[in-house]
Image: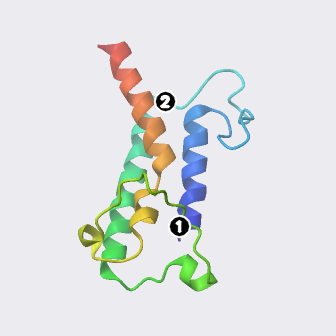
């Protein structure tokens, strides 16, 4: 599930930037400078927000096994400098960091763009 959400995150963030965020190549149709409209940005934000809420709700039920448990490896990278997320807030399961990363790139990009849009309009 988290791999699919990561792919959607990359797709949405790439659309918002008009280029592939992994390779830096311009997306087809974005060469002319026409980008995503404000309405489309709000719709993407709604999809990302609703998905994040759904993931937290699903994970709090505790019926899901992590992909790393299924594969036998743990792909999460953590650092001693990072602030830990309190597992009690999400039902005490092992998904805290994976949940926190759902649509991370998209929400950061939307925050940058939507705050820039309101600054130029006001």
Scheme of colours in the image: rainbow
Which residue is at the far left? Answer: 89
Horizontally, residue 10 falls left or right of residue 120, namely: right
x%, y% of residue 76? Answer: 54, 65
Q: Quadrant of residue 95?
A: bottom left
Where's the C terminus, which quadrant? top left
User: Would you call the spot at circle 2 few (<14 residues within 10 Å), some (14-19), or many (20 or more)?
Assistant: few
x%, y% of residue 109? Answer: 48, 36
Q: CA distance from mark 2 to mark 1?
A: 28 Å
Residue at left offset 27%, top offset 76%: 91
Q: Secondary structure at mark 1?
A: helix
Q: Give the residue at mark 2.
A: 37
Residue at left offset 54%, top offset 83%: 69
x%, y% of residue 65? Answer: 47, 83
Residue at left offset 63%, top offset 82%: 71
Judge depth for marks 2 and 1 and give the one in front.
Answer: 1
Pick whichever, 5 or 74, lies toward us. Answer: 74
Image vertical order of residue 45 relative to residue 36, above or below: below
Residue at left offset 43%, top offset 63%: 97
First of labels 2, 1 by sequence position: 1
Q: Quadrant of residue 108?
A: top left
Q: Visible in this render: residue 44?
A: yes
Tag 2 and tag 1, C-beta contact below 8 Å = no
Q: Visible in this render: residue 40?
A: no
x%, y% of residue 37? Answer: 49, 30
Q: Secondary structure at mark 2?
A: loop
Pick whichever, 110 or 29, lies toward us. Answer: 110
Q: Give the residue at mark 1.
A: 2
Which numbered circle lies on residue 84?
A: none
Horizontally, residue 120 falls left or right of residue 4, namely: left
Image vertical order of residue 16 relative to residue 117, above or below: below
């Amino acid at each position: 599930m988290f791999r699919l959400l990561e792919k959607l995150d990359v797709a949405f963030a790439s659309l918002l930037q008009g280029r592939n965020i992994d390779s830096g190549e311009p997306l087809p149709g974005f060469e002319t400078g026409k980008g995503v409209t404000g309405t489309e940005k709000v719709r993407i934000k709604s999809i990302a927000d609703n998905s994040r809420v759904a993931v937290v709700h699903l994970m709090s039920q505790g019926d899901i096994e992590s992909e790393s448990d299924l594969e036998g490896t743990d792909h999460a990278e953590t650092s001693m400098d990072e602030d830990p997320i309190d597992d009690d807030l999400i039902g005490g399961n092992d998904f805290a960091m994976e949940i926190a990363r759902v649509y991370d790139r998209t929400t950061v990009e939307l925050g940058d763009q939507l705050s820039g849009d309101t600054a130029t309009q006001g």
